[in-house]
Every structure is written in structure tokens, then in C-alpha cells.
Amino acid sequence: MKARSTLAGFAVAMLSVTAPVAFIAPAQAAHGHSAVVAKQHACTKTSSGTCIKGGQFCPQAKYGKNGWDAKGRRYVCKGNHTHPHWMKP
């Protein structure tokens, strides 16, 4: 009988230790969700300050690099090295 009381006391002690973990987990899950939102890229700006669009010229310094339009679509600066354009990969 004493073993059963000790076991019950141990179970209660374990529940009190693990209960705070249940409250921490939703906060971590919410943090993971915000990390997903943060991965969306802001649009790449042109020299005039607007977001890039497919087919527009891109600076030679951006050749081979990625850029994103206002809708989050990815483009790559490629084509002719002298006059590169933003093109879909």
C-alpha cells in the first residue's frame, strides 16, 4: 500500500512539473508561425522606387541575383550582360 501511495505522489509531482511545459508550447507554436510570415520577401525596388516587374531592365550589378515583385514572385536578373532584364527563373 505504501508503494501505491508513493507512486501516486510521484505521479502528482510529475504532472506539476510537466504542466508548465504545456503552457510554453503554444507560445513556441505562435513564434514558429510568425517566422513563416517573416520569410516572405519585400519587393525589390527599381531606381525610381517602384517594385520590379518581369521584363524590366535590371542594373548590371544585380546580374545573376534574385528580386521579388509586389506579389512576392521571384525573378532573376539575367539575359544579355550589357542590358539584363528581370526574368522568371
Image (cartoon, grey):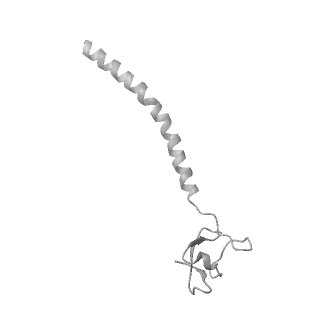
Give the residue displayed 64% in from the left and 78% down from the top.
59
Q: Quadrant of the N terminus?
A: top left
Q: Is residue 15 above or below residue 41?
A: above
Q: Nearer the viewer, residue 6 or 83?
A: 83
Query: Relative to 69, is 37 above or below?
Result: above
Residue at point 63%, 63% (across, down)? 42
Q: Position of residue 64 (x, y in %)?
A: 54, 77
Q: Position of residue 87 (x, y in %)?
A: 57, 80
Q: How many discs appear?
A: 0
Residue 2 spot, x, y in % from top left: 26, 12
Q: Is residue 49 above or below residue 20?
A: below
Q: Is residue 15 placed above or below 83 in the rendered structure?
A: above
Quadrant in which residue 37 is drawn:
bottom right
Give x and y (percent) for residue 79: 56, 85
Q: Quadrant of residue 68?
A: bottom right
Q: Is residue 59 left or right of residue 32?
A: right
State the residue at coordinates (30%, 16%): 6
As drawn, the residue found furthest toward the right would be 48
**Observer-nearest residue: 45 or 59?**
59
Give 68 or 46, whichever is nearer the viewer. Answer: 46
